[in-house]
Image: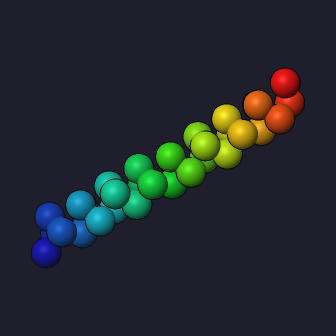
Amino acid sequence: MTINFLIVLTVSALFLIAMCTASYNDDKTKGL
């Protein structure tokens, strides 16, 4: 159960980081 929780937490963290990175890249491209 703990391992499954860690997997879900890791996937969620990676997803949030990917979304933030994509948003940052979009803003940077619009700025240029």
The residue lying furthest to the right in this view is: 31
The residue lying furthest to the bottom in this view is: 1
Q: Nearer the viewer, residue 31 or 8?
A: 31
Q: Residue at x 77, y 38 (%)?
A: 27
Q: Residue at x 83, y 35 (%)?
A: 30
Q: Nearer the viewer, residue 17 or 32?
A: 32
Q: Nearer the viewer, residue 29 or 12?
A: 29
The residue lying furthest to the top in this view is: 32
Q: Quadrant of residue 7?
A: bottom left
Residue 23 locus on image (x, y percent):
67, 45
Which quadrant is home to the C terminus? top right
Is 12 above or below relative to 14?
Answer: below
Is 9 above or below relative to 32?
Answer: below
Residue 1 locus on image (x, y percent):
13, 75
Residue 17 locus on image (x, y percent):
50, 47
Q: Residue at x 61, y 43 (%)?
A: 22
Q: Residue at x 18, y 69 (%)?
A: 4
Q: Is residue 24 left or right of residue 14?
A: right
Residue 24 locus on image (x, y percent):
68, 39
Q: Is residue 8 left or right of residue 26?
A: left
Q: How is the image coloured?
A: rainbow
Q: Is residue 10 left or right of residue 29?
A: left
Q: How many marks?
A: 0
Q: Is residue 26 left or right of residue 8?
A: right
Q: Quadrant of residue 21?
A: top right
